[in-house]
Image (spheres, grey):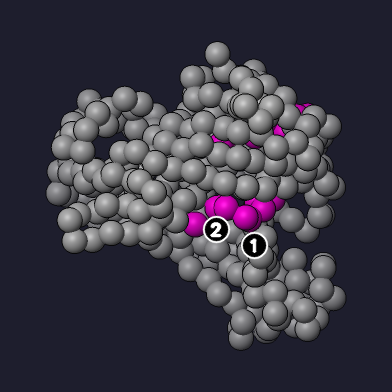
Amino acid sequence: MTVGTTPQGRKIFYRDELKFAFAATDAFVGTVTPGEVFEVETEININAGVLTSLDKRLTESDVTLPFVNPVTGPFKVEGAKPGDMLKVEIIEAAVGGIGTTALWPGVGIFPDWCRQKEFGIRNHNVLVKDGVIHWSDKVKLPVKPMIGCISTAPVNGGMMTVDCDKVGGNLDVQEVTDGNVVMLPVHHDGAYLYLGDCHAIQGDGECNGMGAIEIAAHLTIRVEVVPRPPEMTWPRIETPTHICTIGCARPLEDALRTAFQEMVYWLSADYGLSHEEAYMLLGQVAEARCTQMVNPKYTYICKVHKDVLAQL
């Protein structure tokens, strides 16, 4: 059963039909209408059912790269058509249960890419309960839930869920979280929205590959469809305090340049600055960082506080 109904009368999409690529060739698992609140179950980034206990040690057979980061979807968004922009409001990303973080040969910021030995396979399982990540008897971390994979279908072909690009994908951006709106381009009728790879917390850089607390999640989502701004070529995010632009590339500096370029375009189009003025202003007010550098493309975010925008 892929689709059901919650006690509140909302549609709920279960995690019983998972995908490992974003593509417009997939059949829709269901339809949502703009403004409708719906719920989505997502699965942990590795094989479902593997983490049976806190002392479970992962083995090579438990993870089959690149078939990780299963996503739920695609959802058909009624009325979405090429040239539109999807505004995905994340009402809540609820996480709980057993999560894990791991070291995996060939994945992370210290890859022994030729021999792929490194530290071998190591994992650290945690209990996530009541808003707390129980890292150890001494260390407790606050839950900071996020959606790692959020995407529409690319123009042509498909993109594996380990990757990220102009339609979104495996962005691994902490700002894809409760109360924020993610803006994605639409290239096909219905948009083909996918969601998955949720984390209970993730540090900047996601340094150790499977670097977040990987965990299943229960999402509450609302979508809107609007015309896409002509200057928008990469995903955008709006939070209560900031506007944010995303760039994904290798090498890392190209991801940074892309994120800043997109912010220059946004400031120019919506706030009346020339490209030169926007560029110089970013030299003073930009907040930027690498959110992950372990995927096939690195992700960089550029942010501008709304206190600055209010003055424009």
| Foreground residue among 118 and 58 | 58
The answer to whether residue 118 is above or below residue 265 is above
In the image, residue 181 lies in the stretch drawn in magenta: yes
**Quick one: 260 or 89, which is closer to the camera?**
89
Q: Amino acid at mark 2?
A: Glu
**In the image, is residue 113 part of the stretch drawn in magenta?**
no
> Helix, strand, or loop for circle 2?
loop
Q: Is disc 1 placed on a helix, strand or loop?
A: loop
The residue sitting at 62% across, 47% down in the picture is 90
Q: CA distance from mark 1 to mark 2?
A: 8 Å
**Within-10-Å neighbours for mark 2: few <14, some 14–19, many 20+:** many
Residue located beneath label 2 in the image: 175
Residue at 59% over, 58% down: 246
Can residue 11 be seen here? The reply is: yes
Confirm or deny contact between disc 1 and disc 2 (CB under 8 A): yes
Residue located 69% across and 27% down the image: 9
Q: Residue at x 51, y 55 (%)?
A: 173
Name the image quarter holding residue 47.
Answer: top left
Query: Looking at the rendering, in which quadrant would you find the N terminus?
Result: top right
Q: Position of residue 195 (x, y in %)?
A: 56, 37
Mark 1 neighbour class, 10 Å CA radius: few under 14, some 14 to 19, many 20 or more: some
Asked if one can make out residue 109 in the rendered structure from this viewpoint, the answer is no
Magenta residues, start to end: 174-195
Residue 133: image location, x then y, percent: 32, 52
| 2 relative to 311, above or below | above
Instruction: Indicate left or right for 163 with 259 as reference.
Output: left
Q: Position of residue 301 (x, y in %)?
A: 55, 63
Q: Amino acid at mark 1?
A: Thr
Q: Say above or below: 255 vs 41.
A: below
Magenta span: helix, strand or loop, mainly? loop
Q: Which residue is mark 1?
A: 239
Q: Quadrant of residue 45?
A: top left
